Amino acid sequence: MTRIDRADKKFKGTVLVAGATGRTGRWVVRRLQAHGIDYRLFVRTGSKAIEYFGPECTDRLVSGSIENQAELETATSGCSAVISAIGAYVTDPDAPPPSTIDRDGMSTFAKIARSNGVRRFIQVTSLAVTRPEHPMNNYGEVLSMKLQGENAIRSIYSRTGYSYTILRPGGLQDGEPFRHDLRFGTGDILTGVIDRSDLAEAAVVSLWHPKASNMTFELIRGEKKVCSSFEHYFEQLP
Ligand SMILES: NC(=O)c1ccc[n+]([C@@H]2O[C@H](COP(=O)([O-])OP(=O)(O)OC[C@H]3O[C@@H](n4cnc5c(N)ncnc54)[C@H](OP(=O)(O)O)[C@@H]3O)[C@@H](O)[C@H]2O)c1
């Protein structure tokens, strides 16, 4: 894994990783570690976090659900940024629906984070959130719920001293990072796939890259190409 010297790290605060035991969240943690950035893990199941990150993660763990305001208060307290890769399990009939997680949960999370002084809020959503006719909307209107969650974050975080980034990835795959070119776009017109590892790296770079501030953008992978940094892809953004 590409490791960056701690002296060169570009973000100095503590990042709360929400959904840290999910497939993208796990990569966000690994990329924060690679950049030497301090983090906390917001997870529902502590034992799952210990399984993925080892017993040494115990001091960084905050247990809770995006549905519980008191747990969100505790989790965000003392953090300077959030990277959230939480999303509803749309094919599980026993799981809370997208209206609870992707719309209401996202909105409440952003409100509580801002009131606790968290300056940067970075959220992973999806391509096609602006397309109500998309077949994924047959699952609890998940894309439309994510769009409403995004709208809430944009509104809550558009305030002097605070900023957001919304990353809308294509279909998620599980390859290693830095093996493909990336394509960034706006206006929800891209289609394609991207590796969770590359999505995670782009979310981490969003912490400090000026082009990511108050930006909503789509991202997919392009040609196979070995690279070591994603900073230049952000220059494609308006
Ligand atoms: N799959 C795709 O092709 C695709 C494409 C575009 C965008 N997306 C979106 O990208 C994001 C990441 O996807 P992924 O496949 O990497 O995610 P994933 O593996 O399904 O993980 C989802 C995460 O959300 C957490 N979560 C769910 N309900 C929660 C709650 N009530 N409170 C706290 N955490 C909760 C889960 O916690 P646990 O670990 O405790 O279960 C898990 O960490 C999701 O928002 C997804 O909708 C997915």
Image: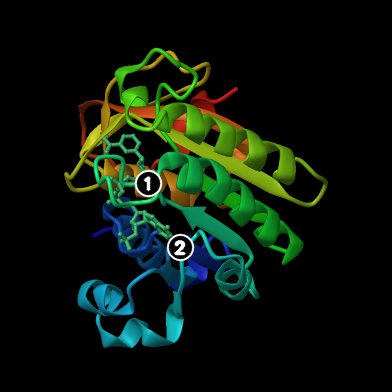
Q: Quadrant of the image for the C terminus?
A: top right
First reached walking from the N terminus: tag 2 or tag 1: 2
Look at the numbered disc 2 and give the secondary structure of its residue: strand
Q: Does residue 60 appear to the left or right of 213 in the view shown?
A: left
* Of the pair 173 and 70, the residue shown nearer to us: 70
Q: Name the residue under label 2.
A: 17
Cβ of mark 1 under 8 A from ligand 1: yes
- Residue 65 percent across, percent down from the top left: 46, 65
Q: What residue type is labelled 2?
A: Val
Look at the numbered disc 1 and give the secondary structure of its residue: loop
- Mark 2 closeness class: few <14, some 14–19, many ≥20 residues within 10 Å: many
Q: Contact (CB < 8 A) between labels 2 and 1?
A: no
Residue 234 visible in the current orientation: no
Cβ of mark 2 under 8 A from ligand 1: no
Is 113 situated above or below 219?
A: below
What residue is drawn where x is 63% and y is 70%?
73
Q: Does residue 154 appear to the left or right of 137 in the view shown?
A: right
* Of the pair 175 and 114, the residue shown nearer to us: 114
Q: Quadrant of the image for the N terminus?
A: bottom left
Q: Which mark is residue 88?
A: 1
